[in-house]
Image (cartoon, grey):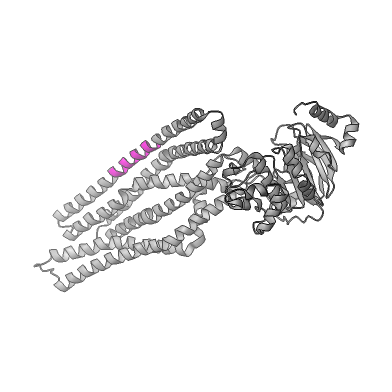
Amino acid sequence: MKETAEKDITLGDSVAFVWSIIGRQKAMFFGMLFCASVFAAVEVALPAIGKALFDGIAAYGTTDEIDAKTVWELVFTLFGFLIGFWIFRYGMYFLWIPYSAAYMRKIVEVGFTRVQQFSTSWHNDTFAGVTVRNITRGVTAIDGIMETCLTQFFPTFMVILGSAAYMAFTGHPIMGLALFVFLITFVTITGTISLKVVAPRNRAANEADSHVGGLVADAITCNAAVKVFGAEGQELERISAGLDTWQQRKMRAWYAGATNGILQTVLTVGLRAGFVFTSVYLWTRGQASLGDVYFALSITAVINSYLRDFGTQLRTLQNNINDIDPLAAYMKMTPAVIDAPEAKPLAVTEGGIRFESVTFGYKRGLPPLFHDLSVEIPAGRTVALVGRSGSGKSSFVKLVQRLYDVQGGMIAIDGQNIAGVTQESLHKSIALVPQDPVLFHRTLAENIAYARPDVPLGVIREAARDASIDDFIMSLPEKYNTMVGERGVKLSGGERQRVAIARAIVAARPILVMDEATSSLDSVSEAAIQDALLKMTKGRTTLIIAHRLSTIRRADMILVFDQGRIAEQGSHEQLLAKNGVYKGLYDAQVGGLIL
């Protein structure tokens, strides 16, 4: 399945995914199955021992009388089995504790790792809140699946099959067969309703639930914009519309589940009445003993205790499977950008970048943004990318980072095709200072040292001084231990940008990308860090995206983009002398126009 947010997942896909998680510790899994099998067998053995005990007591004073010793042996055996039942039942739970913690941890790791592999386009098109909700729901879902199957469904089937086998071998094969047929009928009817009626409604309700979660997360993340425009009511209306859909779908799912539960209750009551009436009828005809009547009463009570909540459990299981579907879908999706089978780490010796006949477009079927684009960026040079918005500057650097794959041609760094190296090694060779820096809700020190988390505080402070942010940080009560808030909301735009510059300095990567790296700084602040920027770019291949042309005069080379092609290239002076596209952009800015 291609990388997409659509879900065309089957039950088999979800079951296979669950087994891929829980099957990692097979010894514990089968150990719990053994415990469940034993206490299910004891559930059948207890009524059987009770039957023998009742028959023994009923035979008192008759020719079939058994001695008191045998009766007491049966009593002690009965309680011995009862103790064994609880030993194995709680034994299973003691095995379950470490097992459950392990597979719940694993599903978070697997889910997180998978979504991290998806492309920038996928993340741009998908609510982060929905993704987080899918992963967290998957954690509780897999535990619910295991609990329902191991403590309810598996013991239920074992008890019914064991009871049917016991009756078949103790002179009542018809009743045993009837019990087996009931099991098949019960599971078929209720299972069909659950899968064909309840499940689709639950799935639709879950999709609406995820959508509401995404709307809430989007509004909360953008709370500053909501407040600025006084749009609280507007956002509430959007969420209310989503809640209307969720409420309708959820009620349909609940009504379907309740109807299924009523049907299951009718079937279990009919089973119990049929068995008890039949055993009493056989007793009146001398074809069944008092112990047989006791066995029918007690075993149907046991079966009823398991099946009484079967509808709820089946609905819970189906809900949990629906909740696991999105994660199972993630596992089936093929990331748009993947490492080649024989990919090797990128070895950057100089940092030269070459585009060779590159063709690239964001949407297949539409004209490409770049067509047969070729350009050479010498190692260690500072190259500025300029042009109007949408001309291809940002796309160019995204392709260098291999955030997208090209449809034709090749991009090479030091002669190595980046499509043939590992993405991790490529990304670890490039430092980025974005126009709108994204900071983690962590300390300032952690954000600055993100690329090299083990560097000492002295290195962090030196980078902060170069970025002209150290004085500000030291004025804070918590200094470098100050939390910056989600996405750095506690800092101004200029402060975030200087933190990002300090982060790039600490990273010390051979290739540097600066996307409007000083756009949020005033002229005084920009001048204060010019020396740091020059120091940072020295000896590194640097790509600078800039709209303010005054900031890139000292670039070794300027690439002028125009509608996906490089219209001109050269130094600032050379391009002004050409009186071409660059001269037009420069004159527009000097004249006070905004690009």
Magenta segment, prevailing SS (helix, strand or loop) = helix
Horizontal and vertical percent position of residue 59: 13, 65
Q: Is residue 297 left or right of residue 1?
A: left
Q: Position of residue 483 (x, y in %)?
A: 57, 48
Q: Could you tell me residue 453's position as x and y percent?
A: 64, 56
Q: Is residue 427 visible?
A: no
In magenta segment, residue 505: no
Position in image of residue 14 (x %, y %): 50, 48
- In the rendered image, the vertical position of residue 157 relative to residue 516, given as above or below: below
Q: Quadrant of residue 336?
A: top right
Residue placed most toward the observer, 592 or 198: 592
- The quadrant in which residue 438 appears is top right
In the picture, which quadrant includes the N terminus? top right
Please tell me which residue is depicted at 34% across the width and 62% down the height of the picture.
Answer: 89
- Which residue is rendered at x = 42% and y = 45% of the image? 318
Q: Which residue occupies the foreground of this view, 224 or 306?
A: 224
In the figure, 444 relative to 576: above or below?
A: below
Decide if residue 542 is on the left or right side of residue 139.
right
Q: Quadrant of residue 262?
A: top left
Q: Residue furthest left?
A: 61
Q: Is residue 543 above or below residue 295?
A: above
Figure quadrant of the C terminus: top right
- Which residue occupies 35% across, 45% down? 311
Q: Is residue 151 left or right of residue 81?
A: right
Q: How many marks?
A: 0
- Residue 480 visible? The answer is yes
Does residue 258 belong to the magenta stretch? yes
Please tell me which residue lies in front, 316 or 197. 316
Extent of the magenta region: 253-265
